Image: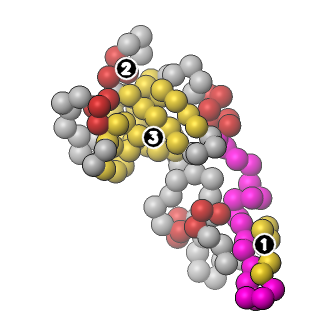
Amino acid sequence: MINVAELSWTHYNHPGEIVEVGQEITVEVLHVDMARERMSLSLRALRENPWPEFRRAHRNGPVVVGEVTRLAPFGVFVRVADGFNGLVHNDALGDLQVRLGDELRVRVVDVDPDRRRIRLSLAEAGRDG
């Protein structure tokens, strides 16, 4: 079995975006449980982790335009690159009301490749951006 976290290094909404039923794929065996007759597999382990490169490319806090992909009680998620969604926390939104699909200019404040998280700021996007 492939756990959903082992399908891709980047964000996706549904496993069908990565693989299709009946599709042949090459995977890495992560763990074999002989007692339960199960194997843990990984598709992403065979692909280069794109997070360190994304972090290098965005280390100077560039302003980017992204699309609002999800609304949450604590903020909004914005797609800043293919497969990379960052969070604009409510305190960084100010009074701005946003909807799904809106385009926002945001500053990449922090990229954490280990936790696969991107922190964005709307308020800071106006500065020298």
In this view of the protein, can residue 70 be seen by the observer? yes
The answer to which quarter of the image holds residue 87 is top left
Type of amino acid under label 2: Glu
In this view of the protein, can residue 103 be seen by the observer? no
Q: How is the image coloured?
A: secondary structure
Image spot of residue 61 (x, y percent):
51, 22
Please report the residue visible at 52 percent of the width from the left and 53 percent of the height from the top: 11
Q: Of all residues shown, which one is farthest toward the top?
A: 128
Please report the residue visible at 18 percent of the width from the left and 30 percent of the height from the top: 95
What residue is pinned by disc 1? 31
The answer to which quarter of the image holds residue 64 is top left
Q: Earlier in the sequence, mark 1 or mark 2?
A: 1
In the image, residue 95 sits, relative to residue 44, either above or below, namely: above
Quarter of the picture containing the N terminus is bottom right
In the rendered structure, find residue 124 and report the number of the disc placed on it: 2
What residue is pinned by disc 3? 86
Q: Is residue 31 left or right of residue 125?
A: right
Type of amino acid under label 1: His
Chain part drawn in magenta = 34-51
Q: Is 40 included in the stretch rendered in magenta?
A: yes
Q: CA distance from mark 1 to mark 2?
A: 44 Å
Please report the residue visible at 53 percent of the width from the left and 64 percent of the height from the top: 17
Which of 105/42 is in front?
Answer: 42
